[in-house]
Image (spheres, rainbow, N blue to C red):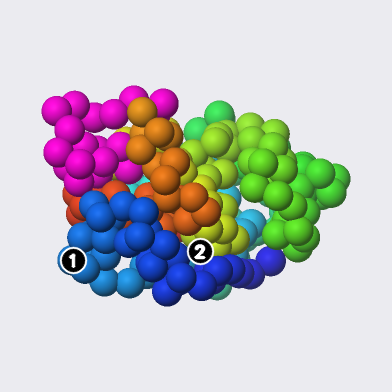
């Protein structure tokens, strides 16, 4: 499945946010229109997400190159059956830890068994998408939120577990401390039904490097 585009009217979202929150309105004036970095390939995105966990970008990219080389010299990502056929020794030689190898296999198993269908996942509700993704080992709620926002283009996602969003709230609203997830949910409540867009401006408020596929 390839996607990566907003499913809503970005101008309408900006107008709504201006009307309900002058703080976000000022950020819109400062940073311009909502322009996230879209993730085009759902399956590839989640393979990369697992590989990049807890690693600096350069180290993760080096491991990714070695891992992809197991499947050919064209840089393509392996199919789920190819991942399931990869031995522990091959994973280890490419620098993929045993834990991450188990996560990659679990993702592949979910796809092969049809428990995770990227071709039709956009037909699910936000909560159903989160439920399906987090059933895979190594995929948490944060990753599911990023997928909803930057692949499926859903308008109303508020990733309160993201420190960048919460730190942006601290800066934008002049708070003394970084708000808790509960407090962040309260701050973002007024943004409905465009909490994804409001969250993006919180990242912008602190010039956070936005989540990317690597």
Comparing 201 with 71, the one in front is: 201
State which quadrant residue 71 falls in: bottom right
Q: Is residue 179 magenta?
A: yes
Position of residue 209 in the picture relative to residue 68 (left or right): left
Comparing 100 with 125, the one in front is: 125
Q: Residue furthest front?
A: 19
Say which residue appears at 56% left-offset and 53% top-offset. Answer: 148
Disc 2 residue crowd, few under 14, some 14–19, many 20+, Cα 10 Å? many
Q: In the displayed structure, would residue 84 be above or below residue 9?
A: above
State which quadrant residue 13 falls in: bottom left
Say which residue appears at 24% left-offset and 44% top-offset. Answer: 168
Q: What stretch is highlighted in magenta?
A: 165-182
What numbered label is drawn on residue 39? 2
Q: In the displayed structure, would residue 106 be above or below residue 78?
A: above
Residue located beneath label 1 in the image: 30
- The answer to whether one can see residue 38 in this image is yes
Q: Estimate the x, y position of residue 57 in percent, counting from the top left.
A: 32, 50
User: Which of the image's four quarters has the N terminus?
Assistant: bottom right
Q: Which of marks 2 and 1 is nearer the N terminus?
A: 1
State which quadrant residue 87 falls in: top right
Q: Estimate the x, y position of residue 194 in percent, counting from the top left.
A: 47, 56
SS for dot 1: helix
Position of residue 158 in the picture relative to residue 136 (left or right): left
């Amino acid at each position: 499945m390839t996607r990566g585009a907003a499913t809503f009217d970005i101008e309408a979202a900006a107008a709504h946010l201006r009307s309900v929150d002058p703080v976000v309105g000022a950020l819109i004036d400062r940073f311009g229109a909502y322009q996230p970095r879209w993730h085009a390939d759902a399956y590839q995105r989640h393979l990369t997400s697992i590989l990049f966990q807890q690693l600096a970008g350069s180290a993760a990219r080096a491991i990714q190159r070695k891992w992809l080389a197991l499947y050919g010299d064209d840089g393509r990502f392996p199919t789920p059956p190819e991942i399931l056929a990869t031995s522990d020794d091959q994973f280890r030689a490419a620098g993929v830890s045993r834990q991450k190898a188990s996560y990659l296999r679990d993702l592949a198993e979910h796809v092969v068994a049809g428990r995770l269908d990227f071709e039709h996942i956009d037909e699910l509700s936000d909560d159903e998408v989160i439920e399906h993704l987090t059933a895979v080992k190594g995929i948490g709620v944060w990753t599911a939120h990023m997928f909803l926002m930057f692949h499926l283009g859903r308008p109303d996602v508020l990733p309160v577990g993201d420190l960048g969003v919460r730190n942006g709230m601290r800066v934008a609203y002049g708070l003394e401390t970084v708000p808790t997830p509960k407090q962040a949910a309260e701050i973002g409540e007024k943004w409905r039904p465009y909490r994804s867009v409001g969250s993006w401006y919180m990242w912008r408020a602190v010039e956070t490097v936005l989540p990317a596929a690597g």
